[in-house]
């Protein structure tokens, strides 16, 4: 009958509206999740950049420390040589 057809269409229409509302809510949630994901990815990229900078700085410090160590070793060698020379001079002057 016509009334049953109208009721059936009305029921289908209401179901379609409900499905559309659920889909819109899911889309809104998905959009929020995508925005949060984008922010997190930006934070991760920034942290990776900081980590890489720290690695480079540590590498530079390692090289600088090695150079300072070599320089100190040379200074120590010169000073030990000078001490030995001065001790020999003192010994000669005592004679």
Image (tube, helix red, strand yellow):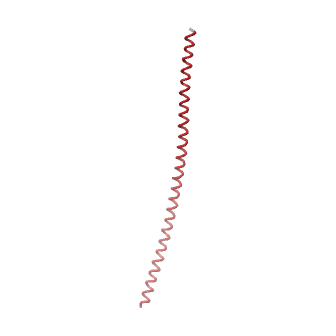
Nearest to the observer: residue 15 or residue 92: 15
Q: Position of residue 29 (x, y in %)?
A: 53, 34
Closer to the camera, 7 or 40?
7
What is the total number of numbered labels drawn onto the structure image? 0
Nearest the viewer among 93 and 14 is 14
Vertical side of 45 occupied by 6: above or below:
above
Where's the N terminus, which quadrant? top right
Furthest-top residue in view?
A: 1
Query: x%, y% of residue 34?
Result: 55, 38
Q: Residue at x 55, y 26 (%)?
A: 21
Q: Residue at x 55, y 41 (%)?
A: 38
Residue 53 drawn at (x, y percent): 53, 55
Q: Please, is residue 37 above or below residue 1 in the view?
A: below
Residue at 54 percent across and 34 percent down: it is 30
| Image vertical order of residue 68 relative to residue 41, above or below | below
Q: In the image, what residue occupies the spot 54% across and 24% down?
A: 19
Quarter of the image for the C terminus: give it. Answer: bottom left
- Position of residue 40 relative to residue 6, above or below, is below
The image position of residue 87, as x and y in percent, is 43, 83
């Amino acid at each position: 009958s016509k009334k049953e057809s109208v009721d059936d269409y009305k029921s289908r229409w209401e179901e379609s509206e409900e499905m559309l509302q659920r889909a819109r809510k899911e889309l809104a949630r998905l959009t929020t999740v995508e925005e949060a994901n984008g922010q997190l990815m930006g934070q991760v990229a920034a942290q990776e950049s900081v980590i890489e900078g720290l690695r480079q700085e540590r590498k530079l410090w390692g090289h600088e420390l090695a150079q300072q160590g070599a320089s100190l070793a040379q200074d120590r060698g010169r000073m030990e040589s000078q001490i030995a020379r001065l001790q020999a001079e003192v010994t000669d002057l005592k004679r």
